[in-house]
Image: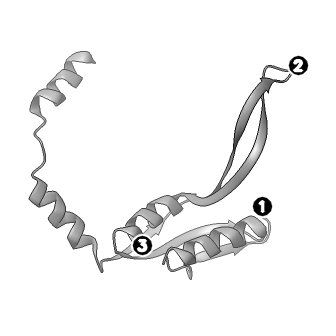
């Protein structure tokens, strides 16, 4: 395995900066469909000042929380940020998390008509 990795690194060439910039510019206005498992990522931020005496886990002093779209939703978010017109096709639950995912996607300029709501899916 090490030899294969060394071979790949040996054949690697630095990308041409102008070509990379042109590829990024070409993203603007492209119509892209992203199909996959979209999920709602939930981040909790805080500080840890001690470890729980009941189990070896940190006790977090909560300071803030943040939600964003993950999975296929993250791919859609990145493509939209590069200027593409993105349609996200995924199955979401009929709950507050599904609604939050849909709202975040809309706020990022992602078309959400392809989000299918499944009443049985949390």
Please rate how many residues cluster around mark 3, counting C-alpha atoms within 10 Å: few if below 14, some from 14 to 19, many from 20: some
* Spatial CA span between label 1 and label 2: 33 Å
Image coords of residue 63 (percent x, y): 73, 48
The local secondary structure at tag 2 comes to loop
Question: Which residue: 10% across, 59% down?
Answer: 18
Label annotation for residue 33: 3
Q: Position of residue 9 (x, y in %)?
A: 17, 29
Q: Earlier along the polypeptide chain: callout 2 or callout 3?
A: 3
Q: Give residue 122's mark.
A: 1
Q: Position of residue 38 (x, y in %)?
A: 58, 61
Residues at marks 1 and 2 touching, judged by CB atoms closer than 8 Å: no
Mark 2 closeness class: few <14, some 14–19, many ≥20 residues within 10 Å = few
Left or right: residue 1 compared with residue 107: left
Residue matched to label 2: 53
Toward the viewer: 60 or 96?
60
The answer to which image quadrant residue 17 occupies is bottom left
Quadrant (top left/top right/bottom left/bottom right) for the N terminus:
top left
Quarter of the picture containing the C terminus is bottom right
Mark 2 to mark 3 CA distance (whole Å): 49 Å
């Amino acid at each position: 395995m090490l030899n294969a990795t060394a071979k790949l690194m040996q054949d690697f060439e630095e990308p041409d900066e102008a070509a990379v910039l042109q590829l990024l510019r070409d993203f603007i206005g492209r119509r892209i469909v992203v199909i996959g498992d979209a999920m709602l990522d939930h981040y909790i931020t805080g500080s840890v000042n001690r470890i729980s005496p009941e189990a070896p886990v940190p006790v977090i002093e909560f300071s803030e929380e943040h939600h964003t779209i993950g999975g296929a939703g993250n791919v859609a978010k990145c493509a939209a940020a590069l200027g593409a017109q993105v349609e996200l096709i995924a199955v979401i639950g009929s709950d507050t998390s599904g609604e939050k995912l849909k709202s975040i996607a809309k706020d990022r300029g992602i078309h959400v008509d392809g989000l299918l709501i499944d009443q049985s899916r949390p």
